[in-house]
Image (cartoon, rainbow, N blue to C red):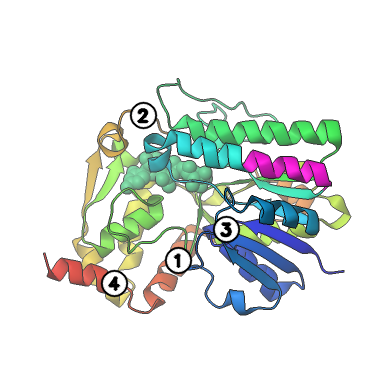
Amino acid sequence: MALKIMILGVNGFIGSALTEAILRNRDWEVYGMDLADNKLGDLPRNERFHFVEGDITINKEWVEYHVKKCDVIVPLVAIANPAQYVTHPLRVFELDFEANLTVVRQCVKYGKRLIFPSTSEVYGMSPDSVLDEQSSPLVYGPINKQRWIYACSKQMLDRVIYAYGVRDNLDYTLFRPFNFIGPNLDNPEEPKEGSSRVFTQFLSNVLYRKPIKLVDGGGQKRSFTYIDDAIECLLIILENQDRRASQGIFNIGNPGNCISIRDLAERTIRIAQEFPVLRENARATQILDVSAGEYYGKYYQDIQVRVPNIEAARRTLGWQPKTDMDTAMRRTIDYYVRQEGFGSRAAALLAGG
Ligand code: UGA
């Protein structure tokens, strides 16, 4: 029988891409909830997609009913933007931790399989040069650095889920995204600075002809992972042939795409020039250094290098990433510039002063 999958936060970056891939490549049914449907395009018309617009913290009965009804639960609702960890730490705790804990407990109660998004951030300021699911220490800063409330909330859920696995034999998989990028991560047409993760932010800066800001010099490194590679891995996890993903923790990342934020800024400017609608803006874009305090405020603390060990995913799931950095960036920009009316908001704003 076709798998029934519940995805909470189905309109998010990962949720929408995953749903699209499931409906295209598999015969599974998807039951999804989210606050909006703007990233879903025509998908709600598919008869195997049962979408409800709503808030999981309000529509509690719908959520519990579908945990009972479905085979696999994928709760993707979370605030995942560092700017918000420092401005709304309690909201992060309430949504990322509390709201998800309820769903985790329902999976235990009804004996359902749980695929849960941990994060590369759980490693925090780990001293390991390559981060390993089984052995790397998870290291955070002091309480007055509120940024860590996100990593801490996610880590606690990892531990709770793991403990339910040991005690109640919960069938779970924890996956740890390493800076996924691609269409629909955030909206580059959003003019408010600081509302996006770094690559979309830089694209937005180009679009609005604002200088790209490098926090503390941009020496920090991230391993950027193209969303299509990540989705391929998630499909293998969902399929779970021979229970290979059950009770496993998997980094999903691309160590080959580990670059500094300064390098990312330079590549953004270079690659954006390949697209006529962005060419002039990209040529005019400057790069500025700012301090972390100026950009994020006093509650922020950064992570200097983040490289995943992906041996577990390679060995157990037979997965490895394929998309190099420039291709990932090019495909993402290409997606945005093809959207109807792309750039008109920015052009109007620039023309109006
Ligand atoms: C991200 C977010 O926490 C989540 O999306 C996720 O859980 C995880 O990491 C992940 O995707 O792996 P981070 O990589 O710090 O955290 O998020 P970004 O906002 O994309 O920032 C990356 C780096 O760019 C940081 O060092 C930041 O200081 C820098 N940055 C950001 C700039 O230099 N300039 C900007 O305008 C924005």
Q: Residue at image x 16%, y 67%? A: 350
Query: Residue 51 location, x and y as percent?
Result: 62, 68
The one of 82 and 168 positioned closer to us in this rendering: 168
Q: Which residue is mark 4?
A: 343
> Callout 3: helix, strand or loop?
helix
> Callout 2: helix, strand or loop?
loop
What secondary structure is the magenta-colored segment mainly?
helix
Q: Which residue is mark 1?
A: 332
Kindly check if marks 3 and 1 are in contact, taking CB atoms under 8 A apart as contact.
no
Give the quadrant of ligand 1: top left
**Which mark is first along the chain, 3 or 2?**
3
Query: Residue 180 location, x and y as percent?
Result: 52, 53
Q: Which residue is mark 2?
A: 299
**Which mark is first along the chain, 4 or 1?**
1
Inter-mark Cα distance, 2 to 3: 27 Å
Kindly check if marks 4 and 2 are in contact, taking CB atoms under 8 A apart as contact.
no
Inter-mark Cα distance, 4 to 2: 33 Å
Circle 3 Cα neighbour tier, 10 Å, few/some/many (<14 / 14–19 / ≥20): many
Magenta residues, as a range?
Answer: 100-111
Q: Mark 3, mark 1: which one is toward the viewer?
A: 3
Inter-mark Cα distance, 1 to 4: 15 Å
